[in-house]
Image (spheres, rainbow, N blue to C red):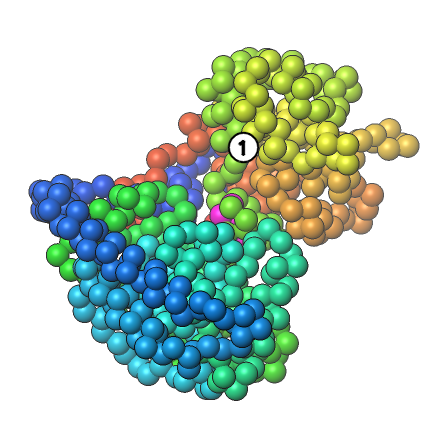
């Protein structure tokens, strides 16, 4: 049977296949198919890759001492001002070596469309899509502008010297104070009336598979100054060159790319985008509007997929949900360590009886009967800790229950309610905002603030003090926006999902993002 959602469309029920596997722009795997591809990558690659890699490495390492000379002897005060017009001969040498290095990698021709605006007209350049290991070649076309990069990259040989060479802005993604300083520095440089060279951003923040544009980070737009969108296209690019958060490793991408005879590249400079007063006041609005313009020019969908920390997420209603839920990784780790999932029901019963609530690391190891310290530490780190460093064992039990392919979606939702509901003064069991947030955080990794919005949305005049079991089941099984989370998204991979289609593995058009299909997830 099926029920109708708010728009009159049939709602997928448990067991229905809605697309097999959700579209994942952070996943790309490529394996050569057919005689010509295999000949090129396995035969020509043996000849071309070592030669090209050696030559490219030589030119890369030649840049090291030149880049170091550019900033040698300069004080911190001098480096706080632009040094673009000092020691310009070194700038030209780095430019020449950089272009030669990419030529050795196979980038023989670069077609440029449009005109790059000067720094006084467009202080910021925003580049998309960011889908290959070689995208930094755009900095050569843009005359080696400054970039914003992770502070960890300063420790990488050669790369660190080059970042200092062009006075890049360094940010620590784990330090809020660092990010605030970066925002202030971006504003300072962007409003210098052309005294500083242009700043170049990849606003997507990470590599996608190029089939869609990921959500633009607002950091490039906080200054509220004009930006120039820059598009990158690879007309003859095979999927082999794509490098994403999950998929082909760096060595494989280098091998597959350098085994091609040549790679054409097109870079298009779109007209300078001048923000409106509303966009100047709202960097998120500014970023979204620029994303839409670039997506339209590329003929690709603009999406809300993004990388939060080290987790790819997609928005579903008010929730930000991990594209690849980490609970399945927890299950794999425990299974490999020899954990008996037959004991899960016993652990659940302890929680329902109130015998086991909050546990520490050692007690968790005892409950799960896991002796490997590295395994239990990884499992423990997944769960939210209180001030005493303890975790809620109900969350652990719920995650373990979700691994059971024989447990239906409705049974899992009912168990979640039973674990976290509390009895009020009238003897009614209700789910509080904290309990609701604990369920979504443990299963989906959803931040409490997002869960709170959904919880408030679900409360009705008949349930003003908390969600009843029926209310929570309506959310989990029949809500027009969130029902598929339990019906499909939280089904164990072995039960409810297939392997990624070949089209998504090898970049075929059949696996491309379709907004009409994604509508089921939004």
Magenta range is 311-315
Classify mark 1: residues with Cα within 10 Å, few (<14), some (14-19) or many (20+): many
In the image shown, does 455 or 387 lie closer to the viewer?
387
Q: Give residue 226's position: percent from left, percent from top.
A: 50, 81
Which residue shows up at 65% across the image and 16% down it?
A: 367
Q: Is residue 66 left or right of residue 124?
A: left
Q: Is residue 400 left or right of residue 258?
A: right
Examine the image and state in which quarter residue 132 appears: bottom left
Q: Which residue is mark 1?
A: 327
SS at mark 1 in the image:
helix
Question: Magenta stretch mostly in which secondary structure?
Answer: strand
Examine the image and state in which quarter residue 400 appears: top right
Which residue shows up at 52% across the image and 21% down it?
A: 334
Please determine whether, in this image, residue 155 is positioned above or below residue 32: below
Q: Give residue 476's position: percent from left, percent from top.
A: 61, 39
Q: Give residue 436's position: percent from left, percent from top.
A: 70, 39
Residue 357 visible in the current orientation? yes
Q: Is residue 193 magenta?
A: no
């Amino acid at each position: 049977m099926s029920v109708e959602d708010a728009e009159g469309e049939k709602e997928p029920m448990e067991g229905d296949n809605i697309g097999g596997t959700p579209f994942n722009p952070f996943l790309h795997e490529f394996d050569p198919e057919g005689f010509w591809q295999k000949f090129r990558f396995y035969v020509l690659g043996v000849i071309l890759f070592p030669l090209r890699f050696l030559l490219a490495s030589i030119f890369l390492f030649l840049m090291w001492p030149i880049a170091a000379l550019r900033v040698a002897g300069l004080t911190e005060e001098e480096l706080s001002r632009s040094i673009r017009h000092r020691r310009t001969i070194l700038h030209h040498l780095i430019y020449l070596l950089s272009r030669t290095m990419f030529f050795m990698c196979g980038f023989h021709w670069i077609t440029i469309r449009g005109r790059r605006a000067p720094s006084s007209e467009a202080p910021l350049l925003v580049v998309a899509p960011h889908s290959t290991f070689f995208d930094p070649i755009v900095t050569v076309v843009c005359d080696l502008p400054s970039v914003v990069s992770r502070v960890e990259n300063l420790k990488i040989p050669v790369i660190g010297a080059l970042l200092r060479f062009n006075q890049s802005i360094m940010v620590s993604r784990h330090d809020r104070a660092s990010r605030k300083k970066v925002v202030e520095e971006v504003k300072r440089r962007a409003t210098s009336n052309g005294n500083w060279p242009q700043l170049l951003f990849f606003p997507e923040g990470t590599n996608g598979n190029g089939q869609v544009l990921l959500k633009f980070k607002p950091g490039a737009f906080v200054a509220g100054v004009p930006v120039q969108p820059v598009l990158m296209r690879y007309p003859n690019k095979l999927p082999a060159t794509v490098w994403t958060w999950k998929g082909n490793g760096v060595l494989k991408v280098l091998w597959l790319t350098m085994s091609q005879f040549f790679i054409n590249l097109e870079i298009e400079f779109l007209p300078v985008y001048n923000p409106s007063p509303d966009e100047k006041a709202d960097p998120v609005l500014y970023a979204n509007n620029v994303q839409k313009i670039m997506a339209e020019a590329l003929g690709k969908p603009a999406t809300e997929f993004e990388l939060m920390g080290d987790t790819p997420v997609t928005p579903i209603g008010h929730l930000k949900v991990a594209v690849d839920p980490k609970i399945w990784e927890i299950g794999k780790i425990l299974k490999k360590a020899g954990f008996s999932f037959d004991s899960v029901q016993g652990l659940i019963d302890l929680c329902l009886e109130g015998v086991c609530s909050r546990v520490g690391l050692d007690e968790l190891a005892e409950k799960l009967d896991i002796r490997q310290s590295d395994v239990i530490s990884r499992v423990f780190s997944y769960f939210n800790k209180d001030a005493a460093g303890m975790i809620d064992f109900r969350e652990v039990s719920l995650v373990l229950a979700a691994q059971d392919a024989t447990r239906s979606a409705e049974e899992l939702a009912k168990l979640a309610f039973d674990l976290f509901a509390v009895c009020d003064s009238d003897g009614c069991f209700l789910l509080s905002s904290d309990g609701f947030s604990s369920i979504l955080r443990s299963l989906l990794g959803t931040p409490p603030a997002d869960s709170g919005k959904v919880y408030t949305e679900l409360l009705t005049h008949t349930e003003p003090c908390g969600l009843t079991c029926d209310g929570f089941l309506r959310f989990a099984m029949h809500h027009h926006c969130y029902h598929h989370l339990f019906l499909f998204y939280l089904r164990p991979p072995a039960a409810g999902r297939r392997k990624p289609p070949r089209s998504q593995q090898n970049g075929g058009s059949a696996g491309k993002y379709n907004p009409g299909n994604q509508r089921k997830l939004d």
